[in-house]
Amino acid sequence: MRLLRRLRSTSLLTRFATLSLLLTVAVGVVLSSVLTTVIEDRARQQAEDAALMAVRLGLQPQFTRTDLTRGFDVERLAGVEKAVDDASDQFGTEGTPLAAFDPIELKVFGADRTILYHSEHPELVGETSQSGELGAALDGYVVSGFAHSADDGAGSEDGAHQLLEVYVPLQFDGAARPGGAIELYLPYAPVAAAVRDDVRTMTVALGISLAVFCLVVLRVIASASRRMRRQSEALQASADRDRHQSTHDALTGLPNWVLVRDRLDQGLAAAGRSDAEVALLLIDLDRFKEINDSLGHSYGDKLLCQVGPRLRSALRDADTVGRLGGDEFAVLLPSVDGVGEAEAVAERLRQALHQPFDVDGVILDVEASIGIVLSPWHGTDSEELRRNADIAMYAAKELKGGAVVFQPEAHATTPVRLSVLGDLRRALDGADELFLNYQPKITLDGGRIEGLEALLRWQHPTQGLIPPGEFIPVAEGTGIILRLTERVLNLALAQQRCWLEAGLAVPVAVNLSTRCLLDADLPELVERLLTEHRVPAALLRLEVTESAVMGDAARCMDVLQRLRDLGVHLSIDDFGTGYSSMAYLRRLPVDELKIDRSFVLGMTTTAQDLVLVRTAIDLGHNLGLTVVAEGVELAEQVDALRELGCDIAQGYHYARPMAAESMTVLLARVGTMHDERLRAGS
Ligand code: C2E
Ligand code: MG
Ligand code: MG
């Protein structure tokens, strides 16, 4: 039992080796005992056969039936003795199958069991024997068995003194039963020696074969087990790697949202048991995009890698720092003592980030906006906390840096605006909630469709249709606006491809926000999407607001110029609401100017608005731009605009923004002025 227990605690390979060794030994023992019996039986059978043949061929011809009924006279006896000797000489020769035939004692019995001849004790002739074996021999069977010679010491095991006693019937031709029988005592020693030799040879051969078998099996198993161990180690390593990749950010190696959420859930469960508070802080670096754009992505990446350790240095061991993507980081405080402590930690984090960063010799100053939420006050599950932390972080961004604790009351006053971020991310991950409406721009001289404006719509699953004015400004505060713009461009160009295939060539305008204009990668994105959707650049227009361009005209200029170089047309949107300088306007590579609808609305009632509209039209024309009036709702506005020489009008007076299918019908009915232009190759 102890051995078994010890065996159980060893390695699988040792256990297998021991078991197979034991099994092989057991098989060896069984095999050798079976084979030994077979060898012994075969040897005895051979001796029996030898005796039988000796009797049949050598002795029986010496006897007549009369000898067996009446006994031998002296003369015949001498003949019998000679025959016995001859038979022993003839068959007892070493090397023949009958080598064992060298009878020690020989008796001849008559059919009535009388001893007719006894080679060793002639005085017993005439006695009868009651032996059962003799009876069987007189019934015609050859019977054999072991006997011991008179000088055999007790318990001789080696067979040296063992005798093989064989009864052979003497069967004469034509007789129904044997006429007598011969009992022979043959020495068993030669047979036993042959058996021993055979058994030894067999045992050695068996032992060697089983040992070789055992070794081969063990080798195969050892190498298979090594291979399996290596494979399982590799699998384990790859599973660990996968697990790490799915829970960590590839760039910084920090936990990603999956892991932060997991720890947040654990923290919430633990806090629920102990009434403790859990805090989640969302940190967004301010103006990171500018660093990325001005110094290049590799600097941006290196800076992001330095942010994690910096944040870590201001925290306790139990706290978690994660990166959620872009320039957004999260800090999880699994146990805080109220809002005050969370704010103190946020301040420490901001201070830590305020220390200048050295990125390959370039000293960078980083500021961050932090949104703070505490469970259970601002949410009890991880998604709700993240969404509210997003809202608080956005509020912090609006305050231009600093840390803001989520305020449910502030949330309640502007519900859609502040809660959209999380939902917008989800909408962008899906395919159904965001879609475009199209509004036509009509030529004032001929009433033809000059182009369309694509306007984004968001069908929120619970809040219904949300107008762009409520979510685009929120998205503009974060990197989401870039994803949103890419989605809009994709939708607009895919739709344009459909129209082109239906034979409708119409320019479509897409609105760009300020943040997009600061993105140095935008021209490449536009170029790639135009190629992907196989839409000519001349059929795409990009609208940028006047204020966006004026905010950072120098930086926008480069992006605008590269877009213009692609062949894309550019428009200044909401003209009149910003304070554009004539000098900049002149240098901007734009084609079109869209007068803001607030002026168009008042132009027939307010003299000031009329002056502004007129000035805008003149200015546009002087700069060689097409002038569009937005928000045209009334026929008198159309007349006034026409009189002022405005080129194009857009507004409810002509058509409200509509779904693509309705626009297809309208386009087919009214036709576009670009059909002809495009056909003419202009
Ligand atoms: P916008 O580019 O000036 O677009 C024109 C807006 O005026 C649209 O509002 C349109 O529905 C509305 N409009 C058109 N005709 C009339 C009219 O006769 N009367 C009145 N009262 N309004 C009229 P919408 O669709 O609500 O869009 C609002 C703003 O949201 C847009 O102003 C644009 O700045 C922004 N926006 C829309 N889609 C996108 C987008 O895909 N990307 C970005 N960045 N901004 C977008
Ligand atoms: Mg627009
Ligand atoms: Mg506008």
Image: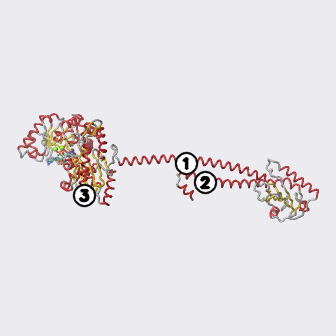
Q: Earlier in the sequence, mark 2 or mark 3?
A: 2
Where does residue 262 sit, x and y in percent of width and height? 34, 53
Report crowding for label 3: few under 14, some 14 to 19, many 20 or more residues within 10 A (C-alpha): some
- Quickly name the residue at label 2: 22
Q: Is residue 342 left or right of residue 594?
A: right
Q: Earlier in the sequence, mark 1 or mark 3?
A: 1
Res. 308 image quadrant: top left
* Label 2: element kind: helix
* Label 3: element kind: loop
Report crowding for label 2: few under 14, some 14 to 19, many 20 or more residues within 10 A (C-alpha): few
* Label 1: element kind: helix
The residue type indicated by label 2 comes to Leu
> Which numbered circle lies on residue 377?
3
User: Do the CB atoms of the residues marked 1 and 3 lie less than 8 Å apart?
Assistant: no
The residue type indicated by label 1 comes to Ile
Res. 41 image quadrant: bottom right
Q: Is mark 1 within 8 Å of ligand 1?
A: no
Where does residue 29 sit, x and y in percent of width and height? 66, 54
Q: In the image, ligand 2 is in what quadrant?
A: top left
Q: Is mark 3 within 8 Å of ligand 1?
A: no
Q: Quadrant of the N terminus?
A: bottom right
- Quickly name the residue at label 1: 221
